[in-house]
Image (spheres, rainbow, N blue to C red):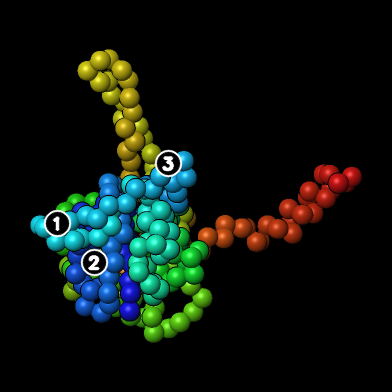
Amino acid sequence: MRFLLTNDDGIYARGLAALYQELSKDAECIVVAPEVEQSAVGHAITIFRPLMVRKARKNGSFLGYAVAGTPADCVKIGICELAGGPVDLVVSGINRGANVGINVLYSGTVSAATEAAIQRVPSIAVSLDTHQEADFTAATRFARRIAAFVLRHPQPPVALNVNVPAIPEAEIKGIAVVKQGHARLMENFDRRIDPRENIYYWLAGETELPACEDEDTDACALKRGMITITPICFDLTRYDLLDSLKSGIKDHFPRL
């Protein structure tokens, strides 16, 4: 088996190294990751400059391919050019910080997995619910288990968004298959002044749950100490509104 590993925290991130160490027990793992951090770049791709790729090394050993691009770039070029053969699974992570609710749209980690699904390769995005230095053991072990599950249960290529609570493994309450919720980053901008008296702003804030968030959503289940799994896709259509929108457009534009 051949796995392609990537992330949005950069090729030297601890979460990616931990993921490689665990998944290499079951498959040949090829690392194709951004050369620098690309958090919150969403599904951006590089089209107006060459996509530079170099062999990255750590302690003298080959680590993987460092790409001067986004997580989606890494998956595209990894599958098409660098993997050296068919890819059975793409795993993105392990991200520091949960990717739940509306924040999924901004996430480079999740977008890498979504790009794999576009390329017809099953994929998993794995995130750990902390921004601090953390123990990735529980997240890597579960990543290995869910990877085995995906490979043993063939289905149309889908991206699974996995979030693991940052608590001792023995305290994890279980696994919840849930829908994406509406939790979002409640932004505020820290206004600062640089040494040359220029004003600049630093985006800050925390993810908050809406007052009416359903219990069977990613953020709520994660908060309860559950590992969450959400199948996601790249089709953003609101199918429930198609008929009413068609009717409204027909009434408003009768001559078209």
Label 2 vs label 1, nearer the camera? 1
Identity of the residue furthest to the right in this view: 255
Q: At numbered mark 1, what does the secondary structure look like: helix, strand or loop?
A: strand
Residue drawn at x 65%, y 61% as measured from the top left: 239
Q: Quadrant of residue 225?
A: bottom left
Relative to residue 243, is residue 230 depicted above or below? below
Q: Is residue 228 left or right of residue 255?
A: left
Q: Is residue 230 visible?
A: no
> x and y percent of residue 197 in the render?
27, 15
> x and y percent of residue 13 in the render?
21, 54
Q: Do tag 3 and tag 1 residues touch (Cβ < 8 Å)?
A: no
The answer for how far apart the CA atoms under marks 3 and 1 are is: 27 Å
Residue drawn at x 27%, y 70% as measured from the top left: 29
Residue type for callout 1: Lys
Dot 2 surroundings within 10 Å: few (below 14), some, or many (20 or more)?
many
Q: At numbered mark 2, what does the secondary structure look like: helix, strand or loop?
A: helix
Relative to residue 5, is residue 250 depicted above or below? above
Residue type for callout 2: Leu
| Mark with earlier residue (3, 2) | 2
Task: Report which residue position mark 1 lands on.
Answer: 58
Location of the N terminus (image quadrant):
bottom left
Residue type for callout 3: Arg
Task: Report which residue position mark 3 lands on.
Answer: 49
Nearest the viewer among 1 and 146 is: 1
Q: Is residue 233 left or right of residue 140?
A: right
Task: Report which residue position mark 2 lands on.
Answer: 19
